[in-house]
Image (cartoon, coloured by chain):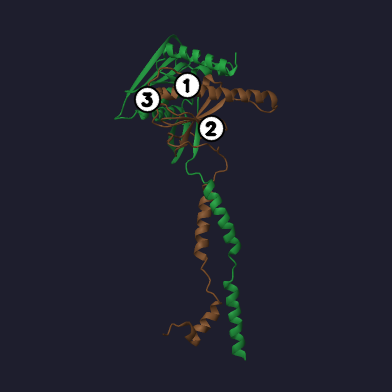
Chain colours: A brown, B green
Amino acid sequence: MAQEPTARTGRARRAQSLLGERSPILLTPLVDMFTILLIFLLLSYSTGGQLMYMAQNILMPESVSREQLEPAVEVAVAKDRIYVNGEVVMDNLAGWYTDKKLLMPALYENLKKKALKFKEMEQKVPLFHFTGKITIQADRALPFHVLKKVLYTADRADFPRISLAVYQRD
Amino acid sequence: MRPDRNQRKTRTREVLAADVDLTPIMCLFIILVPLLLLSAVFERLAALQVHLPEASTIEETEKPADGPTGIVELRLLLKEDGLSLEGTLSHDPSGREKEVYEDIRYDFPLQGDRYDLEGLQKALRELKSQYPKHKEIVLLVDDKVSYDAIVQAMDACRQEFIVEDGEKRSRDLFPEVALSEAFSEEKGFEGLREGTRKIDKKLGIR
């Protein structure tokens, strides 16, 4: 066979020595791709912004608001459960869709404990101020009467400065 | 000998031109690209400040007295069958005090299954142009209205977008939005106080 490695013609051997011992992998397209990707990612990179626990199954509404989220206690209200700072506080909301009561005891207790801890810290740490800020992420399909209960409970538990987290819309 | 030397010269030049060492730049890319991919934000988050009617009483003492704005109160009712804008006016647009407070009311029935936010914005824009100092609006929301509809209505109350010289700009309408319920039930409030007392006791608060 002509293709046998031992039976190489003189021309083939010369070409081999011109290219070097091994033919290199062409890195240029890879570098091109990386450069484009890097520029795209750098452009979409945002330095500001607040990290949030994104709870599952929550589709927040969209808004034209441009206000930045501030660090705060985070309450996430999905259709069937409520999280505080990423931890499940109430895991069956079904009853609250019909209940007339405004206070959610489990949520109130959790938030009140946090408020008490913050107030205690305020006494000890000189530059720390408890502002009563709270961020609420809620699912867009949630009816107002469930949201209302969460808002009232947060307000009662010494978190009166409420912001709603939303997705930005252009 | 001559042609041979020439040949060697061109050969070295070729090798020099082709030999850019891409390894460091690849190293950089390989580190930077995953880092940026991990920290990439595809959905930007924003905040919407809301005031509760109860909580707003605390802030009222801090609020500077701007004098009467001409509007005593502006309310937007969100109901299952549409929007209604209600207001109580104390002054004429010219600044003359009214002898009797005047109530205004506009209704915006549902458009298909959506709120008529365009109509609402038109009415708000007119009010704002007559009473530019007023900033507050209270949203009175019916129980079954969805959170999404509330946020869209809040957006419509806060600001409008106008195209000026081919540029999109926002203009404030009534940016201080308070959220309240349409019909408060006394029983619910009573239950609230009872509930907190019990838990407060458990947590050791007076």
Amino acid type, residue under disc 1 in the picture: Met
Quadrant of res B28: bottom right
What is the residue that sits farthest to the top in this orientation? Answer: B99
Disc number placed over residue A104 in the picture, else none: 1
Quadrant occupied by the N terminus of chain A: bottom left
For label 2, the residue is A85
Residue displayed at 66% across by 26% down: A121
Which one is in front in this view, the residue at disc 3 or the one at disc 1?
1
Q: Give coordinates of residue A78: x percent, y percent.
A: 43, 31
- In the image, is residue A3 above or below residue B157? below
- C-beta proximity under 8 Å, tags 3 and 2: no
- C-beta proximity under 8 Å, tags 3 and 1: no
For label 3, the residue is B145
Tags 3 and 1 both on a single chain = no
Q: Which chain is mark 3 on?
A: B
Q: Which chain is mark 1 on?
A: A
Label 3 element class: loop
- Judge the density around disc 2: few (<14), some (14-19), many (≥20) Cα neighbours within 10 Å: some
User: Can residue B26 be spotted in the picture?
Assistant: yes
Mark 1 and mark 2: Cα distance apart in space: 17 Å
- Judge the density around disc 3: few (<14), some (14-19), many (≥20) Cα neighbours within 10 Å: some
- In the image, is residue A132 above or below residue B161? above
